[in-house]
Amino acid sequence: MLRSLVTALRTLTVLSVPGKDTETFSNSLFWFPVVGLLLGLVQAAFGHIVAWKELSAAFVVLGGIALTRGMHADGLADMADGFWGGRTKDAALRIMKDPNVGSFGAIALSGMMLLKWVAVLKLLEFSAFGVIVAGVLLARWVQVLLASSLPYARSEVGTAHSLVNGAGRFHIVITSFLTLLFLLFLFHADHYAFLALIPAALAAGLVTGVLSYRKIGGVTGDVLGAGSEVTEAFVWIAGALYYGSPHLLFLI
């Protein structure tokens, strides 16, 4: 199992950890919530760096990109380019494989970074560091849900082929238990936060999954990355609404 943790860390972060990778790539999914928790704690710590909240919020957002090599942000850009630039499944998949970022990808990235910065800025005003951690944690959980619920969209073997094809219900059960356990730790004094954050994460996963299934018939590594980005934004926005305007949130 330690090999699976090594693979998860190498897959989701810039960390060059010692050890051998797991022979079954999908086993690394069990550790996604753990890695998400670690990343979230580091990103939340970035929020403490300076007193100027605008800069701290930028550190949180950009720190997440740096810690993940921009992999998930790149997935969002590729998905946006492919889904809105390709009329057919084959065209969308071909565009998504292109390493260059097009206009749709640039718009999606800039818009996502702006949304995240605004949400994190609001969270820092309320010292809601737990929500920052939860957004990163839930984003990795949603990656597991997408990989375990939808087929791999490409006919040829891609980077996420073995990850998706080896995923199943057991991965969902274990990672859901771990995610809930970590959330209980983060919000032991405020269980009502679950009413805002978990539904927000599920909504992000559902939107990403349905859109991807309709467009390309499944998921790819880019879709998993995009799902992570969308989930972080949804959770952080929901958290900002929860602490800033709770009545508005529950009316929605």
Image (cartoon, rainbow, N blue to C red):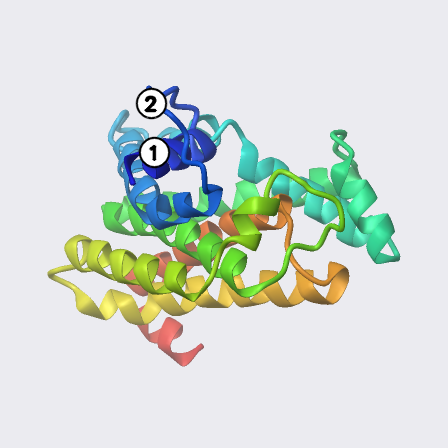
Secondary structure beneath label 2: loop
Question: Residue at (22%, 70%) from the top-left corner?
Answer: 192
Quick check: can you spot residue 73? Answer: yes
The quarter of the displayed image where residue 153 is located: bottom right
Q: What residue would you read off at disc 1?
A: 3
In the rendered image, residue 112, in percent from the top left (x then y), is placed at: 57, 45
| Residue kind at label 1, given as amino acid type | Arg
In the rendered image, residue 125, in percent from the top left (x then y), is placed at: 28, 46
Secondary structure beneath label 1: helix
Please give the label number shown on residue 19: 2
Label 1–label 2 contact, CB within 8 A: yes
Residue located farthest toward the bottom when viewing the structure as drawn: 251
| Residue kind at label 2, given as amino acid type | Gly
Question: Residue at (76%, 53%) from the top-left corner?
Answer: 83
Q: Quadrant of the C terminus?
A: bottom left
Is residue 167 toward the left or the right of residue 34 in the image? right
In the rendered image, residue 171, in percent from the top left (x then y), is placed at: 39, 58
Question: Sequence order check: which comes first, mark 1 or mark 2?
Answer: 1
Question: Residue at (76%, 62%) from the top-left corner?
Answer: 215
Please give the label number shown on residue 252: none
Q: Nearer the viewer, residue 155 or 99?
A: 155
Q: Nearer the viewer, residue 17 or 20?
A: 20
